[in-house]
Image: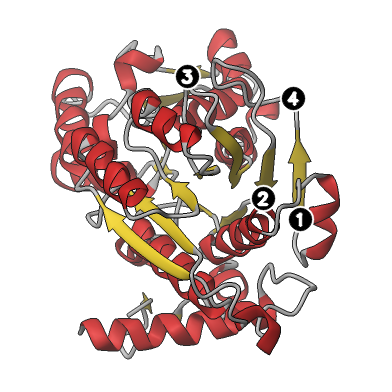
Amino acid sequence: MKSKLLGILLVLVMIVSLIGCSSDKDTSTSSDKSSDKKDIKVGIAMPTKSLERWNRDGAYLKEQFEALGYKAELTYSDNKSDQQVNDIQNLIADKVNLLVIVAIDGESLTTVLKDAKDQNIPVIAYDRLIMNTDATSYYVSFDNYTVGKLQGEYIENTLDLANAGDKTYNIELTAGDPADNNAGFFYNGAVDVLKPYIDKGTLKVVSGQTEFEEVATPAWDTATALDRMQNILASYYADGTQLDVCLCSNDSTALGVTQAVDSDYAGSNWPLITGQDGDVANLKNLLDGKQSMTVYKAVANEAVVTVALAKEILAGNKPDSSLTSQFKCECTYDTTSYDNGTGIIPSYLLVPDVVTNDNYKEKLVDTGYYKVGSDGYLTAD
């Protein structure tokens, strides 16, 4: 299975180089694999293998760095902050020339990254902003506020909230990991769209749980989201009160919420359920009508931008907005939005996409990111 997965990932990488957010610069020439690169090593620190997307990200990054002739060392830290600190210490000890890090806890890496800075090792914060350290050189992510905004707008448009009149809808909110800086952006993007309707009474949060701290899900854990939604359903919906919407910030939380609704909801309708990432189990729910949408972030695009950025840094250049002209997808250079507590971190932000039952073939299958299995569902393996 592992060899099969690796083979398919290699195929996907080649597909992405042709149809994804590829760089206009050729990244496969013989000069890219010249001898001056063979001793350059990139350290990649991923948070966990337990979430599908980090397996995809790690594989894309490692393969693309190696395709350029660099050495690449990839670690996974089992969602344990202490282990990630240790992994990064080991990467520094292995004399990597650059670090790409998805932080488990954005607040926990200050000390270890001081060591990186002292040794002149640039750091790219990948997908999640690393907080309270001036060692972070750049940030590459999707426009995280827009992810939540797209979820909120989907709910707004599907229910036609602007024209609801006296009609009301019941909604429950599920956010992400409070240790992940992105979780607040996702949540705020959605709530900023929905709050006027909550204030007006068009949307009613029956549980009363609206503060981020109340609705957050540590480690984005599916079982935690399941337990919390079961408690909400037992406390507020057991009498058959209708639940119309479940705002979920990502697919792992949406999976838990969907399981709770499937097993514990007493109402006669099925609520709208949002998500993010395009995990295979959630895409199955999407096709079955159990999940309404997912905000898909083409992780191959994020990897392409990161590799191009790293290439510039390793060449001794200082990347800026001009780098975005290389890409065949929408990517903006932002120097105002992301302050990690030590100052603004220059950021390259990609634009995510809404995937529904109506457009999944165009967005996911035709682009080569997924294929349709013999059972009719989407698969990446």
- Name the residue nearer the viewer: 376 or 148: 148
- Residue for badge 1: 330
Q: Quadrant of the C terminus?
A: bottom left
- Residue for badge 4: 336
Crowding near pointer 1: few (<14 within 10 Å), some, many (20+)? few
Q: Which badge, 4 or 2, comes first in the chain's sequence?
A: 4
Residue 3 is drawn in which quadrant? bottom left
Vertical comparison of 39 with 351: above or below: below
Labelled pair 1, 4 in contact (Cβ < 8 Å): no
Labelled pair 2, 1 in contact (Cβ < 8 Å): yes
Identity of the amino acid at label 1?
Answer: Glu
Residue 230 is drawn in which quadrant? top left
Q: Which badge, 2 or 1, comes first in the chain's sequence?
A: 1
Q: Position of residue 110 (x, y in %)?
A: 39, 24
Q: Quadrant of the N terminus?
A: bottom left
- The structure residue drawn at horizontal position 32% and vertical position 21%, both measured from the top left corner, is 215
Q: Secondary structure at mark 3?
A: loop
Identity of the amino acid at label 4?
Answer: Thr
Q: Which disc is residue 362 wearing?
A: none
Q: Position of residue 149 (x, y in %)?
A: 62, 34
Q: Of tags 2 and 3, which is closer to the observer?
A: 3
Identity of the amino acid at label 2?
Answer: Leu
- Name the residue nearer the viewer: 197 or 120: 120
Q: Of tags 3 and 1, which is closer to the observer?
A: 3
- Residue for badge 2: 350
- The structure residue drawn at horizontal position 26% and vertical position 51%, both measured from the top left corner, is 48
Q: Of tags 4 and 2, which is closer to the observer?
A: 4
Identity of the amino acid at label 3?
Answer: Asn
3D distance between C-alphas at marks 2 and 3: 24 Å
